[in-house]
Image (cartoon, rainbow, N blue to C red):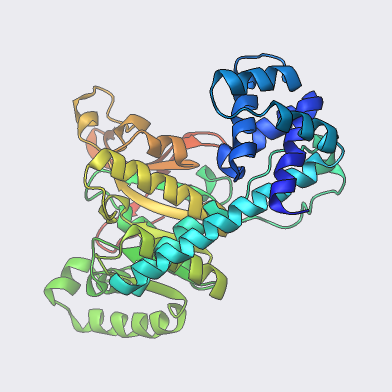
Amino acid sequence: MDSVETQEAVLGAALINRVALLKVMSSLQEEDFTTLETRSVFKAVASLYRQDIPVDIVTVSDEIKKAQLKDGSGYITKLYQSYGTSTFVDSYIDLLLEARAKRALKMLIGFSGEKAEKEKTEDVVGYLQENLPGVLPENNSGEISASSMFEVLPDWKTKHYISTKIEPLDKLLCGGYYEGQFILLGARPSLGKTALALQSAVELAKDRPVLYLSYEMTRSMLRDRLYAYISGVNLKHIRMRELTEDDYAMLRVAQAELRETTSNLLLYDRVDLNIHQLLSKISVLSQKKNIAAVFIDYLGLVPVPGIKDEYPRMTYLSRQMQSIARKTNIPIIALHQLSRAGRERKEKFPILEDLRGSGSLEQDADVVIFIHKEKEEAGGVQVLSYYLLCAKYRDGQIGKEYVDFNGSVMRFT
């Protein structure tokens, strides 16, 4: 059966069977009908369906005449007589969806070929990576029974999360980072976002590859932080090169450990890496390496070609982060700045509305963690206390955990 016959068979089924009509209306579009006759009939059927008017030979013929689409009463009769069965409508719909996907793929390949002549290879690959999923047909005509999900007992022994290696954070996250999660780590400037992310990343990299993309700090800055974290030498002394003999000794020990344990830590510090290149890199590395997690420091600095205004840019970035986490089944941990609005509130603990840029962030993220610093009384003396706050957990509970942060060596415990 060729494409036109398939289109006619689908329309014939819709004319005689209400269930077939519902399937056609929920799955197909006008673009799926490629001849003047089949497209005219589909438009008439769709118009009647939207008005909740019964669909049959008479009403469709009248609708075609009324809309001046085409005088097709004879054609309608042919459809009814030749293809008036709904037995194979699901198969026919699948064929038309497949044909739509092939047309879209040809257009995408053609357009990508034009882009390849003018743009960088990375940009073209990123464009393909972003748009290829939209080519695949989505068929809603085949429903499943919920009972099919319970035919086989799940493997309850396999853990689908990895420890963050920071105990208070593990408590908030029900054990750690789960597969396919989009996690936001938010805080105001200089509260330890990068320190927390880098500490978790370097510890995870002892077992599996980890991707860390830094848009804010250079490789040398990250290197100094790692030296401070592993050696226990004050970061300020490392930066100013004011080191004692004991410091040098501890740094040499740290160097040996870092050389051995960071081969799996994949660091990128290209500030011009745009969202399409970023998604392409994550996708490619997820297939080539057994990536444990991806850290983005920080989300607000990721360039989005063609979008300059903050709100639509952050909305786009948020959706892409959620999407790539789902597609690769890898946890994506994105660092993010908070707005200054919270400073005006009496209650200083951050809330979801403090996320800077777009309401899509709090909607798309599976988990939102905040770092918060609070002045508290202890024995008549004011001290600074640090807390990790879970403000959103799609599959868990919100809460807070006290955490100790040693800023001189960038370490959370």
Q: Nearer the viewer, residue 251 or 96?
A: 96
Residue 406: x and y, percent?
30, 56
Instruction: Specify whether 203 is left or right of 44.
Output: left
Q: Viewer-proximal residue, 71 or 124? A: 71
Position of 43 with respect to 366 (left or right) is right
Q: In the drawing, does residue 16 fall left or right of residue 257?
A: right
Inspect this view and state whether residue 50 appears.
yes
Image location (x, y in percent) of residue 49: 64, 21
Q: How many marks?
A: 0
Residue sitting nearer the eye, 386 or 244: 386
The answer to whether one can see residue 177 in this image is no
The x, y position of residue 270, in whole percent, is 27, 69
In terms of image quadrants, where is residue 45?
Answer: top right
Vertical arrangement, residue 145 with respect to residue 191, above or below: above
- Identify which residue is drawn at 61% across, 24% down: 64
The residue at 29%/45% (across/down) is 313
Report x, y in % for residue 355: 31, 37
Residue at screen point 35% across, 41% down: 315
Tell me which residue sits at (78%, 42%) in the image: 90
Q: Is residue 2 above or below residue 204?
A: above
Task: Say which quadrant the C terminus sits in.
Answer: bottom left
Q: Is residue 103 left or right of residue 144?
A: left
